Amino acid sequence: MRAEGHAVESICAVLREQGVQVAARTYRAWKKRLPALRTIEDARITNALRSLQIPDARGRPWPEIIYGRRKMTQWLRRNGFPEASKHTVDRLMRQEAMNGLVRGRKTRTTIPGTDGRRAGDLLDRNFTAPAPNQVWVTDFTYVPVYSGFVYVAATASSSCTPGRSSAGKPQPSRTPRSSNTACVRPCGGANTPDGRYRRD
């Protein structure tokens, strides 16, 4: 535009007519202003990250290319970026689509049966009992921890008569939400691996 003889003021006047409030001195100040320190540091770190994507003289990738955010931060601090922040490295690695190599495998907690059938419901969704300590309902799940995972189990006893509580008030039947619910009866028996109840 300027090569065609249009000054900055005329361009800003057209922009103001279109609803963009830009002053000529604002444009000139932006042209003369130095880039922010964060912008300069981000550009230097980005160049270092991109240099790892270029194969070495033998055509092999650099071993640091598989680093994640934590190892990459330590590597940058050892190679000319002592003030590199882990948050900055994380943000710039996301921009460069660098995720690192995730080692290990996922924890498998459920192994389906060979026949593809689930264990049967021994109570037919009827969670009431004529007397205390007759029907037990248990549910379990797992919680990830730093060293792996731990199982967490919850067990409840149904001591209500059908449709009524110990206080004599009608109670709605409750259905557990989890698919891992197992119903057992504490009568000296146990559940077999296929989910059936076995008495001793």
Image (cartoon, rainbow, N blue to C red):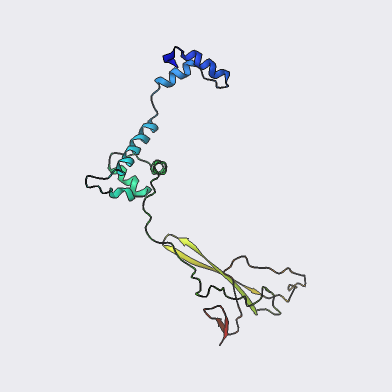
Residue placed most toward the observer, 199 or 24:
24
Give the x, y percent position of residue 35.
39, 27
Quadrant where the N terminus is found in the figure: top left
Q: Is residue 57 visible?
A: yes
Q: Is residue 154 visible?
A: no
Residue positioned most to the bottom: 200
Instruction: Please indicate whether residue 187 sits to the left or right of residue 85 in the image.
Output: right
Taking the spot 22% from the left edge, 44% from the top edge, the residue there is: 57
Residue positioned most to the left: 57
Residue placed most toward the observer, 141 or 105:
105
Instruction: Please indicate whether residue 21 sits to the left or right of residue 7 in the image.
Output: right
Taking the spot 26% from the left edge, 49% from the top edge, the residue there is: 60
Position of residue 38 relative to residue 121, above or below, is above
Q: Count up the numbered dots.
A: 0
Give the x, y percent position of residue 59.
25, 47
Residue placed most toward the observer, 184 or 112:
112
Position of residue 113 relative to residue 81, above or below, is below
Quadrant where the C terminus is found in the figure: bottom right
Position of residue 156 relative to residue 51, above or below, is below
Instruction: Please indicate whether residue 198 sits to the left or right of residue 31 in the image.
Output: right
Taking the spot 44% from the left edge, 11% from the top edge, the residue there is: 5
Quarter occupied by residue 196? bottom right
Quarter occupied by residue 41? top left
Give the x, y percent position of residue 30.
43, 21
